[in-house]
Image (cartoon, coloured by chain):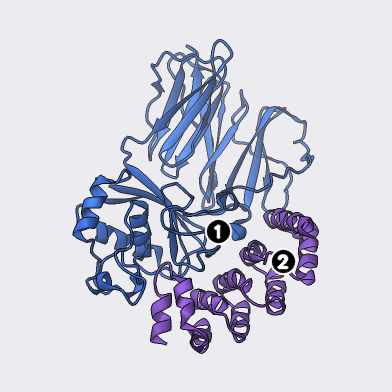
């Protein structure tokens, strides 16, 4: 099973869906499943600059500028900006969430123990009291599961976790109780959503164990992590991919501990970036693998053909061109995916993989077979 | 035209080999830049690596394309042009509306750029609004200053 992620910085001229479909057809005819784990149109700071990457040669040892795509060559902090406080002030620590690059919300537990928020959508709006009848007994925590969604969790005076959510369509819900683990919990809840389909709430139980409650369309019951771990503070969960979560906690002796969760099935995972174009010594390309250098990834540019995605993934899996450059194109004649003469000229639908290519896929270290 | 298309159609064209098509390919490349959005970026890039007095005129078409992908490719190839022609193109692209094009230009400037390009980069190092590009411009300015 080839498992891969797509990150779209610039949409190609031909649809991504057709490329993914083409890839599934091509590899599927040899019993190789293709699983698109995630597809995201990125909305990140300085997006336009990230759509152009620098690459060298594209023969499995491409040089690249990963920092220019997902990092700053030089980190730059602003100075502190005063955002004021709600009427009467607030206690504890603020919570923040940005459901997209265009919105940011900050939430606090007001001095009146109500939930207050301040919103940014290009400029900061005034503090607003988000009443709803809950008297907060902890600092709030906030997260988002989609560009049109936010939710806030807090402890109520009844000792339960309470949730309030917002969507573009329905605005704010009323507070909903999620109960509490057996015996109760200490401090504030914490939350993480690794994708739009999952949400987890974690607390430090009254027994100092980690407890969690999961949502995957509906809420499941509180579960205790029976691993011997004991917390001396509320946990801090996070997620690095749609199939990953980790939790950090302060142990009883004051040290920082971490545990993580991975999706149960992992074979190979490849990341493909859809970009505007590239610079570098290789010249203008339809695609290049591997990118980032030495990693199981590839870039596909705006001018890709329907089969470029599958072709570049083939390179990531260790396949080389079977012919080319033009006019030396014997593989193109029978529609081999790995032709070096241009997948846009392949008429076989789907393209094929030659016998040696099929064998190679079985022995290459990244092979899904 | 068939030979030109054949050279540009691979996912990763061999531009060194394609350059051997020579100046007779330039009119076809000019046509592709304006008529074939899938091949246009590669066409403008090839125009730059073909060593001919007419290359600059064709590459300039790429700098004026409405497609930012073509303008990115133009930035990548302009450094192969004679200094005066390259300078005109780079000065245009360093002021492009698209941040990705400006980035491509900053990453592709020749090793010994013209005085005008140096001055523009010095200005961008101070005034470029995009923080990423401002950092790249600063780095380029410092590198060029050491070479003087």
* Callout 1–callout 2 Cβ contact below 8 Å: no
Residue at 58% x, 32% y is: A141
Mark in front: 1 vs 2: 2
Q: Badge 2 is on which residue?
A: B112
Q: Colour of chain B?
A: purple
Check disc 1 and report the residue beneath it.
Answer: A53
- Confirm whether circles 1 and 2 share one chain: no
Question: The residue marked by circle 2 belongs to what chain?
Answer: B
Relative to A187, is A310 on the left or the right? left
Q: Does residue B16 show up?
A: yes
Q: Count residues near mark 1 (Cα–Cα under 10 Å), then give few for <14, some for 14-19, many for 20+.
A: many
Q: Residue at x 58, y 52 (%)?
A: A44
Residue found 56% across the figure and 54% down from its top: A43
Position of residue A301 in the picture relative to residue A220 (left or right): right
What is the chain identity of the residue bearing mark 1?
A
Above or below residue A168? Residue A188 is: above
What is the C-alpha distance between the residues marked 1 and 2? Answer: 22 Å
Where residue A284 appears, as percent x and y from the top left, is: 50, 69
Residue drawn at (47%, 11%) of the image: A207
The location of residue A355, given as percent across then percent down, is: 19, 58
């Amino acid at each position: 099973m080839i498992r891969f992620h797509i990150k779209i910085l610039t949409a190609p001229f031909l649809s991504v869906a057709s490329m993914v479909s083409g890839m599934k057809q091509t590899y599927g005819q040899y019993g190789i499943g293709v699983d698109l784990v995630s597809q995201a149109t990125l909305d990140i700071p300085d997006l336009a600059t990230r759509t152009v990457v620098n690459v060298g040669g594209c023969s499995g040892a491409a040089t690249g500028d990963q920092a220019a795509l997902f990092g700053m060559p030089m980190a730059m902090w602003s100075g502190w900006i005063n955002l004021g406080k709600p009427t009467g002030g607030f206690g504890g620590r603020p919570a923040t969430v940005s459901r997209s690059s265009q919105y940011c919300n900050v939430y606090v537990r007001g001095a009146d123990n109500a939930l207050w928020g301040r919103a940014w959508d290009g400029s900061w709006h005034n503090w607003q009291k988000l009443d709803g009848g809950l008297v907060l007994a902890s600092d709030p925590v906030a997260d988002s599961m989609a560009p049109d969604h936010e939710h806030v969790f807090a402890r109520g005076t009844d000792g339960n976790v309470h949730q309030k959510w917002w969507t573009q369509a329905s605005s704010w819900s009323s507070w909903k109780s999620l109960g509490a683990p057996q015996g109760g919990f200490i401090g504030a809840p914490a939350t993480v959503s690794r994708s739009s389909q999952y949400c987890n709430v974690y607390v430090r139980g009254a027994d100092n164990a980690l407890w969690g409650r999961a949502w995957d369309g509906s809420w499941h019951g509180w579960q205790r992590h029976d691993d011997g771990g004991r917390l001396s503070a509320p946990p801090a969960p996070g997620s690095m991919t749609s199939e990953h979560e980790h939790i950090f906690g302060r142990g009883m002796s004051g040290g920082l501990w971490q545990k993580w969760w991975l999706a149960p099935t992992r074979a190979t995972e490849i990341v493909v970036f859809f970009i505007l174009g590239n610079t570098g010594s290789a010249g203008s390309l339809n695609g290049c693998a591997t990118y980032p250098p030495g990693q199981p990834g590839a870039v596909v540019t705006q001018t890709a053909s329907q089969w470029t995605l599958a072709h570049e993934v083939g390179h990531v899996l260790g396949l080389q061109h079977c012919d080319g450059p033009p006019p030396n194109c014997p593989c193109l004649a029978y529609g081999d995916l790995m032709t070096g003469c241009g997948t846009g000229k392949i008429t076989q639908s789907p393209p094929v993989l030659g016998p040696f290519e099929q064998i190679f896929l079985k022995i290459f270290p990244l092979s899904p077979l | 035209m068939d030979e030109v298309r054949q050279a540009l159609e691979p996912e990763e064209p061999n531009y060194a080999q394609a350059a051997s098509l020579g100046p007779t390919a330039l009119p076809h490349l000019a046509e592709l830049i304006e008529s074939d959005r899938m091949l246009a970026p590669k066409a403008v890039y090839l125009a730059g690596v073909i060593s001919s007095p007419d290359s600059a005129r064709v590459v300039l078409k790429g700098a004026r394309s409405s497609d930012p992908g073509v303008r990115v490719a133009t930035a990548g190839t302009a450094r192969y042009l004679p200094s005066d022609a390259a300078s005109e193109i780079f000065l245009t692209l360093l002021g492009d509306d698209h941040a990705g094009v400006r980035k491509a230009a900053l990453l592709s400037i020749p090793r010994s750029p013209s005085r005008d390009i140096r001055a523009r980069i010095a200005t961008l190092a101070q005034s470029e609004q995009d923080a990423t590009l401002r950092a790249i411009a600063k780095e380029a300015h410092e590198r060029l200053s050491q070479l003087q």
